[in-house]
Amino acid sequence: MTQTLAAQINSVLAALILLTAFGLLMQRRIYGLLHLFAWQGVFLSISTAVVGYTAGLHHLYISAILTLALKVFALPYILYVLIHKLNIKKDVEEMVNIPTTMLMGIALVIFSYHLTAPVRELSTLVTKSTLAVALATVMLGLLMMITRKKAVTQIIGFLALENGLFFAATSATYGMPLVVELGVALDILIAAFIFGIFFFQIRTTFDSLELKEMEKLKEED
Amino acid sequence: MTMTAPLAAAFFAVIIFLIMAGVAPFLASRQASLVRIAFLFSAAASVMAVYAGIAAVSAGSAETLIIPIGLPDLPFYLRVDALSGFFVAVVALLGLFVSIYSFGYVSGLAEGRPVTSLVVFYCLFMAGMLLVLLSGDAYFFMISWELMAVSSYFLVCFEDESVEARRAAFIYLLVAHVGAVMILLAFGILAGFAAGFENFGGFTFQAMRGAHLPPMWASIAFLLAFSGFAAKAGVIPLHVWLPEAHPAAPSSVSALMSGVMLKTAIYGMIRVTFDLLHAGAWWWGGLVLCLGLVSAVMGILYALLQVDLKRLLAYSSVENIGIILISLGLAMIFKSFSMNLLAALALVAALYHCLNHAMFKGLLFMGAGAILHSTHGKNMEGMGGLIHRMPQTAVIFLIGCLAISAMPPLNGFVSEWLAFQAFLLSPVLPGQLLRLLFPLGAALLALTAAMSARCFVKVYGVVFLGHWRGKQPCEAHEVGVSMRLGMGLAAVMCVGLGLFPTFVIGWMDPITKGLVGASIGSSAQAFGWMWLTPVASARASYSAPILFAGVMAVIAAAYYILHARSSAVRRADIWDCGFPKLTARMQYNSTSFAMPLRRIFGSLLLIRESVKPGDARRPLPFQERFTYHLRVMDRVWYSCYRPLSDAAFWVARHATRLQHGRIQIYLMYSFITLIVLLFFA
């Protein structure tokens, strides 16, 4: 596999990741969100493996396997079980309507390309063109957290954001050292457990998972 | 290391206090024995520390000990020299008297509520104060300083169910911490210039002493350290916590806080300005002198107008700190003009007043505690005639009142007289401002002395003389033996320090020799122990023993004339000017006694005064009742602190608009910040 081929495959995967990020923004069903999130994980994993192959960095394979195991299977499964057990309404409730969100997302992608232009000119890596996509994925994840009402959708937004960060790490510097990767992977898993506990706590306190209920925690003057 | 070494003895005393603080919670189930054991040990530890302090001053040399605990590479340095030895002796001496007093006083408190926390924090407080004086590096100093501040915070809010106590404690903690930050910054500057800002080499006092600061940085360090210590000492305008905290705390604690905790701040000032910064520009002294004068005059003025006994004593502490600062400022001015002998005289006056104030203010607060203990009230308007109920306490309290009013031959007179000598003996100094400041300062000091005498005439007259003013019949009774013993020992010290000043001044020689390079011990004792001649006998001399003998002779003669012949005293009704319905309410009370001064100095204070007729329909001459309302407020509070706290609340109210309680909005803040930073980076 030549460098150019690898770069092209990588670009395709980057495009798919961006596509799933937009898919997360416009998806109205919670199970659909989970599927899209899992697909994003798949693309991310393949992309990592490809980068690892072309750059000859074997520890990236481990990262790829970890990503596959955690983000494609474990986390969606945990969230699926949670949604099922908590009997959450299957619709995504948004604060800003979806077309507007999409427009904002497009603006953010353009902004990311604008921001990373200087980096693209300086970098010599195969993956240099994907940095903009990675940044865009981070921002879209954040946008999703801001525009959704339910706690579960926020968690998925957060995890998508983390995917973006991971992608940025592989595309900008061929990944972080393995120790850091392992640590981050473990953090994500623990975060998922903590989210699960919090869901139960929030529901027992407020009888709902609407974040609006948490406004009551504010101090009245 | 032998056990006779002063540092070892002092350190051992600290260890005893710390152990007692640790052990006390285990004795909580037996309150009576807890009080007895704890105060027995703290009295023993105090005796040891008194010995250590006296020996350290006599030895005159510095002793250092390094304890390898704390952070790695940052051991604690313990150090005792003549200056810290002096303050250790002062702290421990009053600590001894208060410990003895506490046997009775705290047992009385223990009948109403558990006193375990009081005992624990009392021991920690004593240990903290001693460690502040013993620490030889800035790092350990700050730790001890915080230990002292926090433990006294818990002592102030000992009666934590009362809103006033909690509020007072909060204000105290706030001021203490603002002060501590200033001190920390000052030490930071000193350490930075001693060994660079990158390492910890400069944090010992030894290294700071050798630092060469540019004049501007020295001035900044001085101003920071001075304002930090001034907050602790209660110098106007940083005194606001004092009149709140002292009445709220138990009396034994107020005695310690006012008597010796304020002195640790004075110690800090002397340590930083004379020892570490080697007393720089003359305006430092000028500033200290001016603030001292303001504190002295305003402090005693506020004291005069108080009706709460402990609040009055607290304001009187502000006044006495002012007097100490006046002497200290003089010493700094003289030192900056290289007049070492006069600097030594002024410094001795300051230190002597520290010792004296610890004794008589400790005595008076203990006395206030005794009065509180037996009458259950703090308001002087409801007291009177206690001399009949508590004859021994009355005599002891009278000695305290005389001493604080600077009446010869008691100790207060000696130190104030020395301060006057420092004013009067000063030659013509360069600078128009100083030439103006000196006579003015002497005049204001005289005014302060006179008003403080008036203030304590009021206290004694209203509380002990006359008739009981309260609505309920008086149930006051004499307090227990240990309380009287604690107060009595302090009173003996007041008399002793007044009668034999030459010995004390001779003992203090090493301190001034070390700090200003001169001493007045030999000249003061030039005419034997009977005569105190600060600089030269041609200028001024004072003999307390002869004066004392004279006073005693007059008292004996008066007693003989009045009592020796039984027919000389004829008891009859008071002459009532033909109006036969005299009641106790017609006596002079605290407010009416202070009224003339309220009229004269009213413009300096914030006074709300109103008289309302009881029945609005009747014309004025036919009114049967009037309601008189008087409120004296601290102008500093309303002009400096209220705007500050209002501004803080205003900012906080507007800042809460950012708080919506919605996660999405909080996330949006981060998101927008991120975008903006990325865009403009």
Image (cartoon, coloured by chain):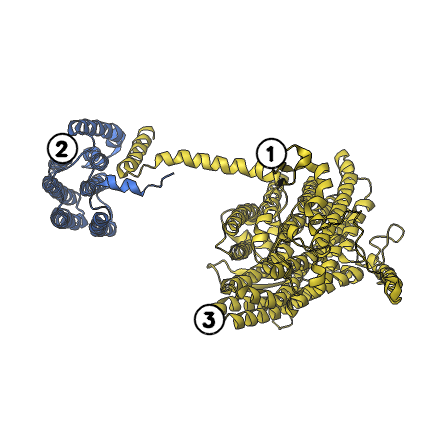
Chain colours: A blue, B yellow
Q: Helix or strand or loop: what does disc 2 sit on?
A: helix
Q: Earlier in the sequence, mark 3 or mark 1?
A: 3
Q: Can I make out residue B240 in this image? A: yes
Q: How many marks?
A: 3
- Give the camera-side residue of B633 and A111: B633
Gap between marks 3 and 1, in whole Å? 59 Å
Instruction: Indicate which disc residue B577 carries.
Output: none
Q: Can I make out residue B60 in this image? A: no
Q: Can marks 2 and 3 be said to lie on one chain?
A: no
Gap between marks 2 and 3, in whole Å? 68 Å
Gap between marks 1 and 2, in whole Å? 78 Å
Instruction: Indicate which disc residue A26 carries.
Output: 2
Given the image, what chain letter belongs to the residue carrying mark 2?
A
Indicate which label's residue lies in the foreground, 3 or 1.
1
Q: Can marks 1 and 2 be said to lie on one chain?
A: no
Q: Is residue B346 above or below residue A123?
A: below
* Residue A131 falls in image quadrant: top left
Instruction: Indicate which disc residue B616 carries.
Output: 1
Q: Helix or strand or loop: what does disc 1 sit on?
A: loop
Q: Residues within 10 Å of mark 3 (few under 14, many from 20)?
A: few
Which image quadrant: the N terminus of chain B? bottom right
Q: Helix or strand or loop: what does disc 3 sit on?
A: loop
| Residue B277 located left or right of residue A207 | right
**In the rendered image, which residue does mark 3 sit on?**
B29
Which image quadrant: the C terminus of chain B? top left
Amino acid on which the number 3 mark rests in the picture:
Ser
* Residue A111 falls in image quadrant: top left
Amino acid on which the number 1 mark rests in the picture:
Ala
